[in-house]
Amino acid sequence: MSKIDDLITKYCPDGVEWKDLGECGKIIRGKRVTKSQLNDDKKYPVISGGFKPLGYFDDYNREANTITIAQYGSAGYLDWQKERFWANDVCYSVYPNEGLNNRFLYFILSSKQDLIYSLKTNAIPAHLPQNLLEKITIPIPPLPVQEEIVSILDKFTALEAELEAELEARTRQYEYYRNELLSFDGKDVEWKALGEVGEFIRGKRFVRTDMVEEGYPCIHYGEMYTHYNIYATESKSFIRAEQAEKLRKAKKGDVVIVAAGETIEDIGKATAWLGESDVVTHDACFTFRSSLNPKFVAYFSRTKLFHDQIKKNISSGKISAINAKGLEKAKIPVPSIEEQERIVAILDKFDALVNDISTGLPAEIQARRQQYEYYRGKLLTFEHLTA
């Protein structure tokens, strides 16, 4: 930080000028293309109102290293486009005037992401008015200061990108070994239908308004594909004890399987319940009770082999769902308990590396992100120029 301090002392000891974004840059809307014109085989991403490209187009209307802000959809979402792209008509592109470093402007705006989100309208659909965006005030230190700040913050973002790339690679490796270990190709192992080795017990209905801050532990089906992973020892939610008496529960060593969701991919994911107390289960979940290692079953539920088996038994509509008979038919390998435990121990190590928010790569990424945000806050705090 000493170099920055020296530069500030040299170039702007009395503070820096602040201007509205509309005074120090231009905001330009893109041009409409429709989904029918897009194809994944085409070259240029189409940036629209979402977090990811709408699709790919055979032409571009923006150069690489451009700041974008979603006007509709995820209105206010700020991003940095590293390659040429097509800006759709609900995407703003932001261009700084001379004297304002493009990447510096991106870091400034990213520090104001919450403010930008707050400017969107409450209309349906919500959108971000350009005139409000133009009124955001921007500090404009001398270019040598901007460039040094960019250099420092880019090092943080590069490190985070390296960690995210490693996490992606480890996740692919984990999925490969999980599928490999649980396919038992060429190995002499008995395969049995889930209905042969255990029983399915459907939960009973309760709604989110039944949940309380303290009470009897429960699992709502919507939490199964957003909160729970391979196993759980504590619940995220609770229900009143008197209501819990009338509902069905999973016991320690049972496996809770989600049976309904917005997409087919949501269905069938299982979590081994290892909590000391019982847990109430929702009627869009099944409890699977067997003598198999519960984590072994949960890991198997995440394999392509398992999902290929249950897909044909999933009904589609507003909500995709599967019944007990559809799950009972799926076959699972049944090696010895010792072999189940050996496989679980291997997969536990991979799972911790890619999913554990306290010790794995996600924890390291989170720590680096917090460090980046801390230094970004310090580096981008400027005094207003005194008269």
Image (cartoon, grey):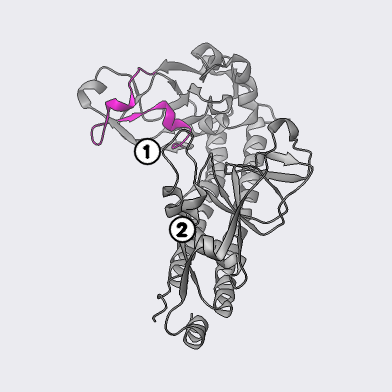
Q: Quadrant of residue 155?
A: bottom right
Residue 386 vertical position relative to residue 238 in the rendered view, above or below:
below
- Image x and y of residue 84, in percent: 73, 53
Q: Magenta stretch: residue 212 in it?
A: yes
Chain part drawn in magenta: 203-228
Q: Is residue 334 visible?
A: no
**Residue 331, labelled with which disc?**
none
Q: Residue furthest left?
A: 242
Residue displayed at 45% across by 31% down = 224
**Few, some or many residues within 10 Å of mark 2 (<14, 14–19, 20+):** few
| Residue closest to the eye, 23 or 358 | 23
- Image x and y of residue 44, in percent: 75, 46
Real-space Cα distance between discs 2 and 1?
49 Å
| Residue closest to the eye, 226 or 188 | 226
Assign a secondary structure to mark 2. Answer: loop
Assign a secondary structure to mark 1. Answer: loop
Residue displayed at 52% across by 48% down = 77
The kind of residue on which mark 1 rests is: Thr
Q: Is residue 156 left or right of residue 249?
A: right
Q: Is residue 340 left or right of residue 117?
A: right
Q: Is residue 243 visible?
A: yes
Q: Magenta stretch: residue 370 in it?
A: no
Q: Is residue 327 left or right of residue 189?
A: left
Residue where numbered disc 1 is placed: 233
The kind of residue on which mark 2 rests is: Lys
- Image x and y of residue 387, in percent: 39, 81
| Residue closest to the eye, 156 or 380 | 380
Q: Tell whether label 1 touches label 2 (CB within 8 Å).
A: no
**Residue 135, labelled with which disc?**
2
